[in-house]
């Protein structure tokens, strides 16, 4: 088992501003290329590949399936081991006023067996599902995928057997607050669910701009009398639909089964889950 005293989480809190700063440094003229050389490999390819699971229940074509719960519960039940990181560094650093920081990321896979119980609670299947339900009921946006830097942060061996599920708030989350500055290769590693699209009803839209403000990738903008969307930047988190006061934003999913199967495939390419009980 790794040795990570509880003060490790406090140390991470004070180092965490670097995670916000790093993507911005890649945008600097001349020296930005140097920072990109170190940033991009860690946040692309097999080291980083994530998807946000839209929290909205009203997704056309989704047949009332609550997508995050279906997907995450499947991985929880398949996982041979699972833990909860005891403190959310993002929320603790920013002293979040909306959500607790004492319930943080859910991590799954054999590599989590090695996490020190001083920084992570080792969970049963039922405890992990209960954690998921609490976080979803709070309206937090689930992010699921391969995040290699978590091995360094929390001390698990890097054997490719770690799946990260973060429950993110837009006010504090590192990725949600810095992804718009990611170099293109890293930004492309945040993958929208297959077949998920977004539509704005111009007759219901009041041009209030709340969806524009809520978009973490800055994929939406007000142009004249319409809200326009950059298809390549949208990551399908669903926050724009959640905040729209007039119900003008609608998310459409072509096929729940196809979206989930594509996500499973990407996870399998990067994370060796093994078998429960192994």
Image (tube, grey):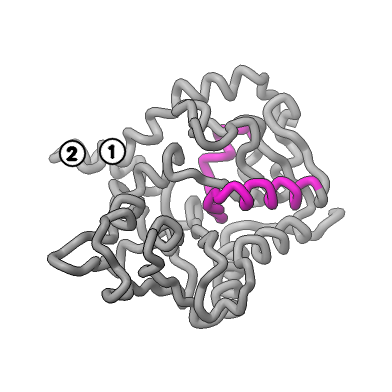
Give the magenta-colored segment's residue range: 127-155
Q: Quadrant of residue 103?
A: top right
Q: How many marks?
A: 2
> Considering depth in this image, is 231 or 221 the residue closer to the camera?
221
Q: Dividing the image into 4 quarters, which one contains the C terminus?
A: bottom right
Mark 1 or mark 2: whose residue is earlier in sequence: 2
Under circle 2, the secondary element is: loop
Q: Position of residue 133 (x, y in %)?
A: 69, 52
- Is 10 on the left or on the right of 115, as rendered? left
Q: Which residue is mark 2?
A: 28
Residue at the image position 51 percent from the left and 62 percent from the top: 54
Q: Position of residue 81 (x, y in %)?
A: 77, 48
Q: Position of residue 151 (x, y in %)?
A: 58, 39
Under circle 1, the secondary element is: helix
Q: Nearer the viewer, mark 1 or mark 2?
A: 2
- Is 254 on the left or on the right of 247, as rendered? right
Q: Which residue is mark 1?
A: 35
Q: Dividing the image into 4 quarters, which one contains the N terminus?
A: top right
Q: Position of residue 59 (x, y in %)?
A: 51, 73
Local packing at callout 1 (Cα closer than 10 Å; few below 14, some 14-19, many 20+) is some
Q: Eyeballing the image, is 24 above or below 72?
A: above
> Considering depth in this image, is 151 or 178 the residue closer to the camera?
178
CA separation in Å, label 1 and label 2: 9 Å
- Is 189 on the left or on the right of 25, as rendered? right
């Amino acid at each position: 088992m790794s040795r990570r005293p509880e003060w490790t989480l406090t140390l991470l809190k004070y180092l965490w501003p670097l995670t916000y700063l790093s993507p911005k440094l890649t945008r600097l003229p001349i020296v930005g290329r140097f920072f990109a050389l170190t940033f991009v490999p860690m946040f692309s390819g097999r080291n980083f590949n994530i998807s946000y699971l839209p929290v909205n229940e009203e997704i056309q074509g989704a047949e009332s399936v609550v997508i995050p719960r279906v997907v995450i519960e499947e991985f929880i039940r398949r996982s041979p081991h699972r833990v909860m990181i005891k403190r959310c560094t993002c929320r603790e650093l920013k002293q979040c006023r909306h959500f607790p920081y004492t319930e943080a990321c859910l991590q799954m896979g054999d590599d989590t067996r090695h996490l020190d119980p001083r920084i992570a609670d080792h969970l049963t299947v039922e405890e992990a599902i209960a954690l998921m339900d609490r976080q979803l009921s709070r309206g937090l946006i689930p992010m699921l995928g391969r995040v290699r830097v978590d091995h360094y942060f929390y001390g698990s061996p890097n054997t490719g057997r770690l799946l990260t599920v973060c429950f993110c708030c837009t006010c504090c989350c590192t990725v949600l607050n810095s992804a718009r500055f990611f170099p293109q290769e890293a930004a492309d590693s945040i993958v929208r669910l297959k077949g998920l699209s977004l539509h704005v009803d111009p007759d219901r839209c009041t041009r209030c701009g709340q969806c524009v403000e809520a978009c973490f990738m800055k994929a939406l903008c007000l142009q004249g009398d319409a809200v326009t969307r950059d298809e390549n930047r949208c990551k399908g988190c669903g926050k724009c639909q959640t905040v729209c006061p007039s119900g003008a934003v609608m998310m459409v999913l072509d096929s729940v089964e196809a979206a989930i199967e594509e996500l499973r495939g990407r996870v399998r390419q990067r994370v060796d889950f093994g078998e429960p009980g192994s």
